[in-house]
Structures are given as C-alpha cells and as structure tokens.
Amino acid sequence: MAGELAGKTLFVTGASRGIGLAIALRAARDGANIAIAAKTAEPHKHLPGTIYTAAEAIEAAGGHALPLVVDVRDEAAVEAAVAETVRRFGGVDICVNNASAISLTGTLQTDMKRYDLMHQVNARGSFLVSKACLPHLKRAANPHVLMLSPPLDMAAKWFAPHVAYTIAKFGMSLCVLGMSEEFRADGVAFNALWPRTAIATSAVEFALTGKEGLKHCRNPEIMADAAHAIFCKPSREFTGNFLIDDTFLYGEGVRDFSAYRIDPDADLLPDFFVPDDIPPPPV
C-alpha cells in the first residue's frame, strides 16, 4: 500500500550509507523516488555501501532509485545531478542535505586542507544543493528542505574542542535560519534535524567509537522516522525549526524508543550540540 510520500521525489546527498540511506529507505517504503547523490561509486576500503547498493535496497523497499555520482563541492556536478533527477522523475519535492565531513580536532591540530573540506562539504555544499533544487521545489506541492544539522546554540562548550568542525556544521543551520524566512512566501520549508545520541553508522564506528561504542548508540531509523514525519508536515506551516529527533517524535506521539537502541542495557552516548534547554522526552 502506498504511503504519504508515494510519487514524491527526494534528492538526498550522502545517501549511499548511514542516516542518508535510512531516510531514503523510509521514503522508499512509501513508494517515493530517490535520487542518491553521493561520491561512493566504488566500495570504500573501510565503509560499506555504494550508490548502486543503495539503489538496489531502495528498489527492494518499494521505491524508485536514481544513483548519481556527485561530489557536493562540485557546482557543475550538483546542477547536472538535479537536472537528471528532474528529467527522470519530473521534479524535486524534498531536498535532504545529509552529506557531511568531520574532524574533531583542535585549532592547532586542524590542517587547512581538512578545514576547507569540512566547509566545502557542510556549509557550502548544503547551500549549493539547496540552491540547485530550489527552482524545482518552488513548483512542488509540499516542498521541504532538511539539513542534518544542529540547533544554533552559541555556547562556547560546543566550539572550544573543535572550532573548525562546529563552524562548518553550524553553517548548515544558518542556511535554515535564513532560507526558511527567505522562501517562506514561496511555501518551501527549511528545517534542521539532529540526533540526541550518537547514531550507529559505519562512519561513526570507523572514525569515533569502534564496534564496542556502537552499543551506546541508537540506530539510524530514529532519524529516518523523524525526517519522514517532517516531510509529511504542511510546508507553509512547518518551517524554520531546529529539531532533536526524540523530542520531535515524542511530540508526534511516539512513546516507546526502545526499538531504536542497539543495546537496551547500555547507556546512550550523548551527541554534540544538543542544547541544555531541550531535555529528553519523559519516557
């Protein structure tokens, strides 16, 4: 049976694995069209998944997939990918800026090549992809842009350990702050979504926690379910929000979060950037 996103077209960056793929698969179960915009055409030496394995999973879930090799730093590649998406599916209804680069290094330990990568992928890439999708989103019935980025909590504790990464990540959220108002009259919603806890992805396992650390994570489906609920909101009424996954889902009626835990007996590892004034839901 078709779901609420049946026939909708999503352009998802970084959708070959992790949270981006989970969001794509959740929409695919509704019968959505998914443009998989990611760099991974060949298997990564450490991380599983390519745009082609993602496409197979999306098709198996009931969606229609368009795998596209895209580096979000490349303006021509992004514009060509959006054009191909429109040619194949007829438009763009939802843009998901999930692609991200991370380096949790202090100022003196951050080389400028890594600094530039984070800013080009996170802030600039999200701006570019949104810009490329916007002419088509403005023609859509219920258009949404979602940034996988945190609330704009200007506390020094979020900046001091990794200034370069925080600036790059908050750049995505600043796009939400500005574009939600800039395109309010056009009915294009811009929202940000961020997890309260670490999310069990291969990238997190490889770069941050290792296999043992995954026990203290939630699975990507919590982000996928939250994103799906956002996309089903009326875009003219639900825009400019900075959402934490479990708090938002609690407001949508979710009361049992146990299914999202990797290990029900392990303490959850808090994520960065969650403001103190957004407490966990009372469950």
Image (spheres, helix red, strand yellow):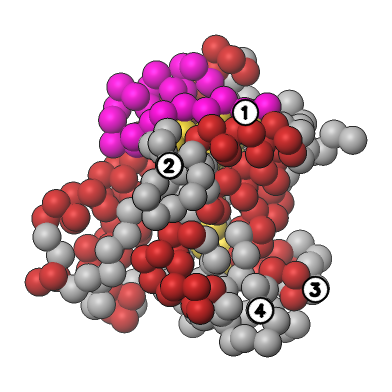
- Mark 3 or 1, nearer chain start: 1
Callout 1 crowding tier (Cα within 10 Å): few <14, some 14–19, many ≥20: many
**Residue identifier under label 3:** 255
Give the number of the mark in front: 2 or 4.
2
Q: Residues within 10 Å of mark 4 (few under 14, many from 20)?
A: some
Q: Report x, y in % for residue 8.
A: 69, 29
Task: State how far apart marks 3 and 1 are (Cα).
Answer: 32 Å
How busy is the neighbourhood of tag 2: few (under 14 within 10 Å), some, or many (20 plus)?
few
SS assignment at label 1: strand
Determine which residue is flagged by label 1: 65
Q: CA distance from mark 2 to mark 4?
A: 28 Å
Q: Earlier in the sequence, mark 3 or mark 2?
A: 2
Rendering quarter of residue 70: top left
Earlier sequence position, callout 1 versus callout 4: 1
The CA distance from mark 4 to mark 3 is 18 Å
Q: CA distance from mark 1 to mark 4?
A: 32 Å
Q: Is residue 234 above or below residue 227?
A: above
